[in-house]
Structures are given as structure tokens and as C-alpha cells.
Amino acid sequence: MSDQIILSKNSIGVGDRFAHQAQAQLQACVLADKAGVEVIPVWNKSNREHNIIGSEPISLRAAADAAVKALGWTKPYHVDADHINFETVDRFLTPSDFYTIDVADWIGKPANEADVQAFVAKHPELNGKLDISNTSSEVKLDADYVAATASKYLAAVKEAGRIYRKILQAKGDGNFIPEVSMDETDSPQTPAELLIILIAIADEGIPIQTIAPKFTGRFNKGVDYQGNLEKFSEEFADDLATIAYSVAHYNLPRNLKLSVHSGSDKFSIYAPMRAALTKFNAGVHLKTAGTTWLEELIGLAEAGGSGLALAKEIYASAYSQRDALCAPYATVISIDAACLPLPATVEVWSAQQFVSALRHDQANPAFNSNLRQLLHVGFKVAAKLGPRYIDLLEEYEPVIAKNVTGNLFDRHIKPLFIA
Ligand SMILES: [Zn+2]
């Protein structure tokens, strides 16, 4: 069984919208390695993103393989079919070895009543006080709560099973890492809900190695966590306790861990996450979201000349289309339009002014989280530029690579995994 694909303790999901930064991203993991900490790279690209860019999943595999070869990386690496479902998974079956099975849309769909009854009957041990150590408060469930929770999540878990078995049939047992994601939904899951979800997943026979719940607070794209830090820290630690308990008592892989989606740039939660991970000797998968694309823009701006000019052009275009660009992301961005600089203002900015506004350095008074979020969702503008954008990525490769690597290593890997 040694050739089973097992996700390591520390891993980072990196996105590479325009398929030019895989080496620079991998370099951040090389730096972690040099610092004595193994952080395994997982290249992820969702079906939605492939559709917007007009790319095929096989291209992500090719870029990852090429980067690994170029840097002589000998540790594992993976390619994640991010947020796939039963209908969209097919073109990912060959190139991917990690599947983020997204069943958020199935949460709350009425479960089969007989399935709910069977679940409750199968798990009398959930009735009463559970001996989960290290939780912030005691976990005490009753049959009504178990039934209500099962009926909220069982349809989603059954659908995850259907998708898992489709992938299994194509790839074979142990040849891929299954993740179940429930993050793209309205309300966060409590640790007690997570427990019941995990037990249902174990019953369904899905050997998930990562689970992505929705956490309390807002995980807006490209900016810091917004919410009650204390509550998040407590919930995160309780989730870790719940996972440890589930792994000990149910048929789930021993390396099962949390996957934190939209995890990039959530600087204020890295210290409490790190403390909880250390306490529970647990690992985590940090899935980043678009942070690399923004570093491409920063690199272009920093380069000056035609790079800076194109960065300004992309901003002006994103600004004029801001309503259309933002609409699909309404739940994951928070932009105060009054705080967006006018394109005419940006037009006369120096390279340093543009970089200061965009780079995620909260200590810099010129940093503008509104501009950053708008450009985050503005990647469609660059996608439409086609070769005009790609040619400049290649022309200014060194300055862009420096920003991509530095962002991942200094602002993400270091505070979360190394400190
Ligand atoms: Zn997600």
C-alpha cells in the first residue's frame, strides 16, 4: 500500500491563472524546505476558472510537471481539480490526483427520510455527552439534533459519494486525494455539525484526506480575515479536536486534516491557526485564492514602462466594468466603491504608488484593499488581453517571479508553517 497517494501534513494550494508562475510558486516551497519545514505544493484550478481563462486541466498538470523538473523538486506535489462536481469532473480525471468534491449546493436539500433514520439508528453513541478532549465547551448531542443535522447534510454526503465513486472508477483506489468542500455556502458549520458530516462521510466510504468547512467570519478574496478573531480561533481549534476524535473513532484516513479555502492573505488568523495546529499536532491545507495573479500585476507595475502601463490599463478597464466583474463574487468581496481611485488618478501614478496601493502590506498607509479586491476579480480583463498580457509576463518574468515567491513564502508559508 506504500504507493498510495497520501497528502502530507503541511500543504499549500496555489493557483496559477495564466500558467506562468509554477516555478516561482514552487520556489517558495523550496525556501520552506531550506528552512527545515516540508510544505507540499498543490496546484489548483477550478472548473469555473478554466472556463473563464479558456484553459484545459491538462495544462495545469504540464505546468506543474515542468516546474518540478526545472527545480529538481523530489518531494510529492499534486494537481487539484478544484470545486468539481459530477458533471464537471470528466476532463480532470486524467491530469489530476487531488479532487475537491464540491457539494455545497446540496446542503439543506432534503435527505431521504429512511437514510436519516438509518443514520440515527446506526449511531446511538452520539446520544449524550461525547468524550472529545480539548474542545472549548462540552459536546452533548441528542437524537433530535443528530436527525436534524443528518437531514441537512446527508444529501450532500451521498452526492459526494456518487462523485467519489465516479473518480474511483476512473483512477483506482489510492491513486488520488479526495477532499470534500462545503465552504461555498451561506452559513458556517459548527464543530458538532462537522462531526456528524465526517461520520456520514466515513459511513459513505469516502476516504477523504481533507475537509473544507465554511468557517465563521468573512474570507474575502485577496484581503485579510474579517470577523470575530476569538470566535474563529475557538472554532478552528474545536474543528481540530473534532477531526482527531473522528479519525480515532470512525473509518477515516489518519492524515485527515482541514482545508482552508480562500486562505491566502488571511494574515490575522495565521498566528491562532499555527497555535492550534501545534497544540493538536495537526496539519492543514491552505488553499490560496488569486494571490499569485495579483503578484503578476505588482511585478508588472514594479517593472515600470510597458508593464506599469498595462497594469494601469487593466485597472481602468476593471474600474469601468466593476459592477459586472463584482456581481458573481458578491459574497466573497467587500468593496467600498467610493474608495476606489479614479482611473485618471491612477494614470499618473508612479510604479511605487501603484505597487503600494496593491501589495498586501497593511502597514503601508497607501495600501487600498478596495483596489486590491477589484483587481482580484479583474483577472477576466487580463484574460481578454490574451497575448498582450502573456507577452509582458514573459518580458518581466524576473521581477514578477520575485514577487510571486516572496508573497507565498514571506507572507503565507512563514507565518503559518514556520513562524
Ligand atoms: Zn473553495
Image (cartoon, rainbow, N blue to C red):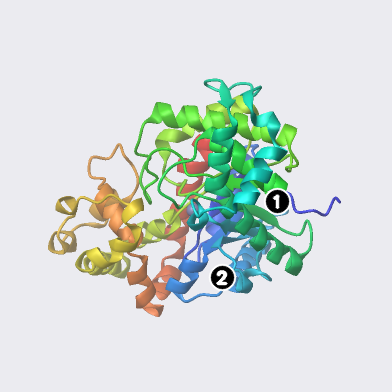
- Residue 286 is at least partly visible in this image: no
Expressed as whole percent of the image width and height from the top left, the position of residue 252 reads 73, 42
Residue lying furthest bottom: 387
Label annotation for residue 204: 1
User: How many C-alpha atoms fall within 10 Å of the one at disc 1: few (<14), some, or many (≥20)?
Assistant: some
- Towards the viewer: 86 or 175: 86
- Towards the viewer: 135 or 124: 124
Q: What residue type is labelled 2?
A: Thr
Q: In which quarter of the image is residue 120?
A: top right
Q: Residue at x 18, y 54 (%)?
A: 337
Vertical side of 4 occupied by 268: above or below: above
- Residue 399 is at least partly visible in this image: yes
Look at mark 2 in the image and give the residue it sits on: 88
User: Mark 2 and mark 1: span between their CA atoms?
Assistant: 21 Å
Label annotation for residue 143: none
User: For this view, does 312 lie left or right of residue 260?
Assistant: left
Q: What residue type is labelled 1?
A: Glu
Expressed as whole percent of the image width and height from the top left, the position of residue 105 reads 48, 57
Q: Which residue is drawn at 70% across and 51% down?
A: 204
Which of the two marks, 2 or 1, is nearer to us in this view? 1
Of labels 2 and 1, earlier in sequence is 2
Expressed as whole percent of the image width and height from the top left, the position of residue 92 reads 62, 69
* Helix, strand or loop status at disc 2: loop
Q: Is the CB atom of the residue marked by disc 1 within 8 angstroms of ligand 1's nearest atom?
A: no
User: How many C-alpha atoms fall within 10 Å of the one at disc 2: few (<14), some, or many (≥20)?
Assistant: some
* Helix, strand or loop status at disc 1: helix
Q: Which residue is drawn at 54% across and 26% down?
A: 275
